[in-house]
Amino acid sequence: MAKSAMKALGTLFEQRFILKCMEHGLHPFSPIEEGLPQDLVVMNHSNELFRVQVKGTRTPVKQRRADRYKITAATGSETKKLIDCERIDILVAHVDPDIWYIIPCKHVKSVRVWLYPHDSTSSGQYESFRDRWDLFDDLGLIGCKTAFPPETDANSFFANSQTASNDTWIQSCLEFCED
């Protein structure tokens, strides 16, 4: 697949994830800047932020019992390096048409993530993370709790068009997470 087609498909998976977040009452934010390690930042109702990398596939790898799917949990175009859990909290893996895996980064142990969504008997290491949207409500064990200025809260911050750009705020929250 051509590089531009792969980028377009990745954008499609990210947009589907944004919609799914909203269906689950989560607040997704997409950075404008290219080249960041996270594709999105997701905020839950407790104002906790999660740095998310979205990967997806629609092509099964054939095997005897049931198809399996491979996600590459890596960064870099030439040499693949495992995603950096210092910079990503959750790997989201999407399998077409509408199957989602919400995998805490600390559980990703290999560049190759094998998923078995059509095998109900599978004991694959990531199957327990299928549709685990509740991990975004996990009291900050994965993400970090943000500190809003005393004069505001999350709802008023994002409702106020006079507030500094959301990207600036998100970047400051990411820096807060790293401290």
Image (cartoon, rainbow, N blue to C red):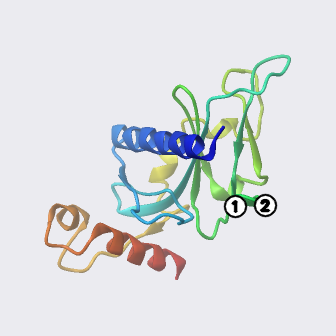
From the top left corner, tell me how far across and down residue 39 is, in percent. Answer: 50, 56
Q: Residue at x 23, y 69 (%)?
A: 153
Where, quadrant-wise, is the N terminus in this rendering? top right
Distance between mark 2 and mark 1 Cα atoms: 6 Å
Query: What residue is disc 1 on?
Result: 76
Lateral position of residue 132 relative to residue 154, left or right: right
Q: Indicate whether 78 appears above or below 57.
A: below
Please tell me how crowded label 1 is: few (under 14), some (14-19), or many (20+) other residues with Cα within 10 Å: few
Secondary structure, mark 2, is loop
Q: Indicate whether 104 appears above or below 1.
A: below
Q: Amino acid at mark 1?
A: Gly
Q: Residue at x 68, y 35 (%)?
A: 127
Residue farthest to the bottom, as pictured: 179
**Which quarter of the picture shows residue 131?**
top right
**Which quarter of the picture shows residue 124?**
top right
Q: Residue at x 86, y 17 (%)?
A: 64
Q: Amino acid at mark 2?
A: Thr
- Residues at circles 2 and 1 in contact by the CB criterion of under 8 Å: yes
From the top left corner, tell me how far across and down residue 118 is, in percent. Answer: 68, 21
Lateral position of residue 1 relative to residue 140, left or right: right
Q: Nearer the viewer, residue 115 or 36?
A: 36
Query: What residue is disc 2 on?
Result: 79
Q: Residue at x 34, y 42 (%)?
A: 22
Please tell me how crowded label 2 is: few (under 14), some (14-19), or many (20+) other residues with Cα within 10 Å: few
From the top left corner, tell me how far across and down residue 26 is, in percent. Answer: 36, 48
Residue farthest to the top, as pictured: 65
| Image mark for residue 115 | none
Secondary structure, mark 1, is loop
From the top left corner, tell me how far across and down residue 11 is, in percent. Answer: 48, 45
